[in-house]
Image (tube, rainbow, N blue to C red):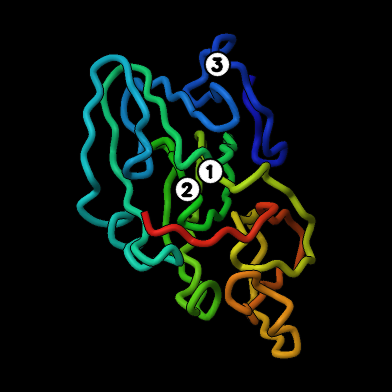
Amino acid sequence: MSHTLKELMQQTEGNETRESFVLQNSKLLKVRLTDEIYCRMGSMIAYKGDIKFESTSGGLGRWLKKAVTGEGISLMKASGQGDLYLAHQAADITVLRLNAETMFVEGRHLLAFEKSVDWDVTVIRGAGVASGGLFTCRLTGTGYVAITSHGPLVVLDAPVVVDPDSVIGWSEGLVPQVKTDVNMKTLLGRTSGETFQLYFDGYGKVLVQPDEPVPDHR
């Protein structure tokens, strides 16, 4: 049983489905690989079968170099036949299926996606740790996407104002605007006195995590 972007998350039982992206548990993704996918560098936990890995020489490998995490994130291509198991620092994983849809995912929360999903990159300047901006991937098409979060994913209806460190992604039709509130300097941003917020106006969904984790550099 698969799920659309609108339905967002329903955890599936890996032994009862033949879908390509299934959750073994809330923190481990199993990919039934028959061709190739893109996944976060270093996210491979185990695999069975004949699978090869190669780093991306351009595109996604470059745009994530200076992401909010500091050293950023690189993606690798996994190709072949077999079962591939992915995870990242025991983070919660959400599997979405795009059905001729578009969504936006903040770079450090992108775990894997099928090659049938097209992508592009934008940067929201002035938002995030050290004003480095949010490196956001625009995902379009039909196929599976896996994203990570620190705690179970939370879905909010726009309009809404959120902390940049808590943003996971958002649905098509929403355009985040950087909002600065110097009067909230000592209240917002548990780790840095963050004064930047993101304001989402319009009709759509905003995906957030229920925490403001300290950005990792791995």
Q: Quadrant of residue 32 in the image? A: top left
Q: Residue at x 50, y 48 (%)?
A: 140
Residue topped by disc 2: 110
Would you name the residue on which mark 1 appears? 147
Categorize mark 1 by other alpha carbons within 10 Å: few (<14), some (14-19), many (20+): many
Label 3 near label 2: C-beta < 8 Å? no
The residue where tag 3 is placed is 14
Q: Are marks 3 and 1 in contact (CB under 8 Å)?
A: no
Q: Residue furthest top?
A: 16
| Nearest the eye: 22 or 1 | 22
**Between disc 2 and disc 3, whose residue precedes?**
3
Query: Between marks 3 and 1, how big is the CA–CA gap?
Result: 17 Å
Q: Secondary structure at mark 2?
A: strand
Q: Secondary structure at mark 3?
A: helix
Whole-number angstrom distance, CA of label 1 to CA of label 2: 5 Å
Badge 3 amino acid:
Gly
Q: Position of residue 63 (x, y in %)?
A: 34, 63
Instruction: Evaluate if marks 1 and 2 touch, with contact meaning CB atoms under 8 Å apart.
Output: yes
Q: Amino acid at mark 2?
A: Leu
Q: Position of residue 85 (x, y in %)?
A: 41, 26
Circle 1 — which element? strand
Residue 207 in sight? no
Residue at x 25% of width, y 23% of height: 51
Mark 1 vs mark 2: which is more N-terminal? 2
- Mark closest to the chain's N terminus, 3 or 1: 3
